[in-house]
Amino acid sequence: MGKQEHDWQDMLASLRAEMPADGPEDGGAGPECEGDAAHPPQGVEAIARRQFRVFRQRKGRAGKTVTMIEGRGLSPDEAEALLVHLKRRCGCGGLLRDGLLELQGDKRVQAKGELEAMGHGVQLGN
């Protein structure tokens, strides 16, 4: 069995040697992550600092909880870019309805943290 143990290790070492260096541990820059907190997507960076109200709602949703985000003065493009960013960072679904951003589930704390990290003011509701 000693020979078989070393065979897979030798094969793995040869595969690693053939692969291009693209990660930070290999001396490369690594793949760029679009959802990286330090570098939000372009559409999100362009949004001016605003005040948001983040609250939870269950009424009229068959008992399901959604997180509502209200931001006054957002254009439809800005709201859509922000929604995509928040859905990706919070790991949930969501939609834009009547100027409000809706995230599936109780994501108030996560959404508040993301918005504050982007420099926005946030008021946390119920």
Image (cartoon, rainbow, N blue to C red):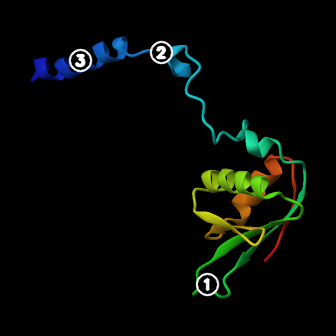
Please tell me in which quadrant of the rendered image residue 46 appears: top right
Numbered label attached to residue 11 = 3
Task: Tell me if mark 3 has few (under 14), some (14-19) or many (20+) residues whose alpha carbon lies within 10 angstroms of its own.
Answer: few
Location of mark 2 (residue) = 21
Image position of 40 with respect to 89: above or below: above
Chain-order first, disc 2 or disc 3: 3
- Name the residue type under label 2: Ala
Image position of 78 with respect to 53: above or below: above
Report x, y in % for residue 91. Answer: 58, 56
Disc 2/disc 3 C-alpha distance (Å): 18 Å
Q: In this view, does 125 lie to the left or right of 108?
A: right
User: Given this view, does label 2 or label 3 mark the residue nearer the observer?
Assistant: 2
- Name the residue type under label 3: Met
Numbered label attached to residue 61 = 1
Depth check, front residue: 34 or 6 = 34
Disc 1/disc 3 C-alpha distance (Å): 54 Å
Report x, y in % for residue 59. Answer: 68, 87
Q: Is mark 2 on a helix, strand or loop?
A: loop
* Residue at (90, 50) in percent of width and height: 49
Q: What element carries label 3?
A: helix
**Quadrant of image for the C terminus:** bottom right
Task: Tell me if mark 2 has few (under 14), some (14-19) or many (20+) residues whose alpha carbon lies within 10 angstroms of its own.
Answer: some
* Residue at (34, 12) in percent of width and height: 18
